[in-house]
Image (spheres, helix red, strand yellow):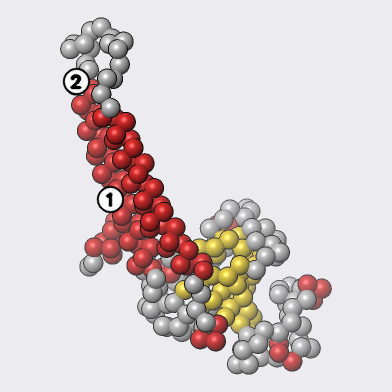
Amino acid sequence: MSRLALINELFGMPPNASEHGYQIDHIIEFCHWFMGALFVGWLAFFLYCLVRYHRSRHPVADHEGVTSGISTHLEFAVVLIEAVLLVGFAVPLWAKRVNQFPETRDAILVHAVGQQFNWTFHLPGPDGTFGRRDVDLVSNSNPLGLDNNDPAAKDDIVVPGELHVPLNRSVIIELSSKDVIHNFCLPHMRIAQDAIPGSIIPMWFKPIKAGTYEVICGQLCGLGHYSMKG
């Protein structure tokens, strides 16, 4: 078992199944090591203060206070490291994820629509063109309002709660919502994105391991939020 896989298991994270997931895992691993070092350092300082300034050794309070600048330097170092972590690692990684999308001609394009409390997936079919959708056509039997009179809609695939994609091929998901804000979260693929009514928000991943993975809603969306899985 690799170091990252072991850390994922220890912290309860599911195994990575996407091409980019190792980058997310690395930044999470670095954050945990940094937090661990801070915890040990501050704990040691706290224990030192308990012993050094115990009442038996200092029965009278010292009103002069700290005269050295060590604590200031330590705090500045912590802030500097956190800034480097944010600006040097987290922001570039996030920018790469949201700004560098694969070519649509080489990717699987999927529309994912959230509603209380399920996901509905819409694929264009063999012709590669999505059929027209009309809000006036939405019904229990036609949850996305697909216009069946549109020639492009004849081969479209609309599936509630289940999505099948090929391995080693990029998948672009365009998210939207019919009611409230949802969050499309696929932990094994290390992706999560809000689905907002009135907006179409893209996200992407490339699966590299075959399996059955759970899609959950990562945003509290109502009483049935717990059951919004796919």
In the figure, 114 relative to 61: above or below? below
Furthest residue toward right: 136
Tell me if mark 2 has few (under 14), some (14-19) or many (20+) residues whose alpha carbon lies within 10 angstroms of its own: few
User: Which of the two discs, 1 and 2, labels the residue nearer the N terminus?
Assistant: 1
- As drawn, is 134 to the left or to the right of 119? right
| Location of residue 162 with respect to 197 vertically, above or below | below
Distance in Å between CA atoms under marks 1 and 2: 28 Å
Q: Is residue 4 left or right of residue 199?
A: left
Relative to the observer, which residue lies in front, 21 or 125? Answer: 21
Please name the residue shown 58% across and 70% down the image: 202
Which dot marks residue 152?
Answer: none
**Left or right position of 94 against 194:** left
Under mark 2, the amino acid is: Arg
Q: Position of residue 175 (x, y in %)?
A: 61, 69
**Which three-letter amino acid code belongs to the residue tagged 1?**
Trp
The percent coordinates of residue 226 (x first, y second) are: 55, 57
* Residue at 62% over, 55% down: 221
The residue where tag 2 is placed is 52
Would residue 187 be visible to someone looking at this image?
no
Q: What residue is at 19 percent from the left and 21 percent from the top?
A: 51
Q: Secondary structure at mark 1?
A: helix
Q: Nearer the viewer, residue 65 or 43?
A: 65
The residue lying at 24 percent from left, 63 percent from top is: 3
* Vertical relation: 183 (above or below) 158: above
Can residue 50 be seen? Answer: yes
Closer to the camera in the image, 211 or 51: 51
Residue 49 at x, y percent in the picture: 23, 23
Quarter occupied by residue 43: top left
Q: Place residue 104 in its image quadrant.
A: bottom right
Q: Nearer the viewer, residue 69 or 204?
A: 69
In this figure, which residue is indicated by the disc labeled 1?
33
Residue 120 x, y percent position in the rendering: 62, 73
